[in-house]
Image: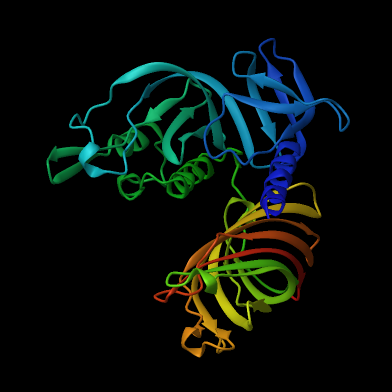
Amino acid sequence: MRFYFCLPLILFFCFTGYSQTKFEPGYFINNNGKKTNCLIKNIGWRSSPTQFEYKLSENDTPKFATIKTIKEFSVGEIYKFERYTVQMDLFFEPSNKKELDKNPKPEYVEKTLFLRTIVEGKASLYLYDKNNFYKFFYTLENEVPKQLFYKKYLVDYRTTNENNQYKQQLFNSLKCKTISSEDALNTDYFKNDLINFFEKYNNCTNTSFKIYKEKPTKTKFNLTLRPGLSFNSLLVDSRVNDQRDVDFGKQTNYRFGLEAELVLAFNNNKWSLLFEPTYQYYKAEKQLNVQYVKLDYSYIEFPVGVRHYFYLGKKSKIFVNALYIIKTENFDSKIDYEILPSFDTEVNTNKYFTFGVGYKYGKRLSIEFRFYNKKPIFLDSIFDSTYKNFSIVAGFTLF
């Protein structure tokens, strides 16, 4: 069983060490102004980077470039980062309201950053992202970017307020005949709202512009047949009589599941929610002194959980699962002592966890190594029990 536990972990670290995302066409410009076309590893930056990985050709050894030597890089049609030295307020809004700052005013310090270009035109919008906490910057006709200042602050222990200075900045700096003060006042400190404002300004001034915006992804639903093999063992320990202890040993049995997967529409569809009703069984007979002890354990488990994908290429990816079995439906399962029927006990299981590592090829075929934590199957009885289960699961996605 130790081998079965280690195998998915070994595969996981081997695969993730090999690749999680792909290299895509892009370029970078160094401090001397030299532009180099290359392949850049697109990691879907959720935080502003200080370095990136690139290759000069498909067969080249990957190298790293840092903010010290690169002033601009771009990959695909979504990501473009430019290096600027800017004045930035370092306070980021905490998740706990009690940790808010009581100072409503900015406290600027000088920082050299890779700012992500969101709108590029006469008026440009930039983003600095720190673990999904945003600070926006803007320029007008290639000036040094200035921070659009917004801050939520604490007035007293239960009251908060907002400094919406950015609205005044927008109205004062980006004046045009079709833009009113209400347009600035109605612009929230969110990416899409600010994109709309900068798009309106650039349209008003009849200047060309480009929006670097992620393509919207759609929520997907997959239904997958999940047959496989289960490697099981059961040890039963009687609390009242050691002579009733039974080691039913190891077995290999079939299992069958039907997986409903909801692939979520963000982060390149790398996350999904799972529900996988699964039928499994374990039947054994053991001679114990002068009697036979039989076990008939068949059940349907109802796990729910999450999955994360790591792309290896256009057609292949690995995934990791974490699931919680919220209910188990047992089918008259029990342990049966031939001579001492008073010892007969029905199976009564509890909720438990399972995790797995798998590989999917194309849209339909997959294989997974699924490991279950040890669990008792005779709750509130005279028996202590340890049921171990490891499964190898094949998958065929119907749609």
198 sits left or right of 317 in the view: left
* Image quadrant in which you'd find residue 323: bottom right
Q: Is residue 54 visible?
A: yes
- Picture coordinates of residue 237 (x, y %)? 51, 68
- Of 147 and 258, which appears nearest the observer? 258
382 sits left or right of 142 in the view: left
- Of 227 and 145, which appears nearest the observer? 227
393 sits left or right of 116 in the view: right
Q: Residue at x 57, y 86 (%)?
A: 336
- Picture coordinates of residue 252 (x, y %)? 75, 70
Q: Is residue 372 above or below residue 239?
A: above
Q: Is residue 388 above or below residue 285?
A: above
- Picture coordinates of residue 332 (x, y %)? 55, 89
Of all residues shown, which one is farthest toward the front?
A: 290
- Of 348 and 221, which appears nearest the observer? 348
Q: Residue at x 64, y 23 (%)?
A: 72
Q: Is residue 334 visible?
A: no
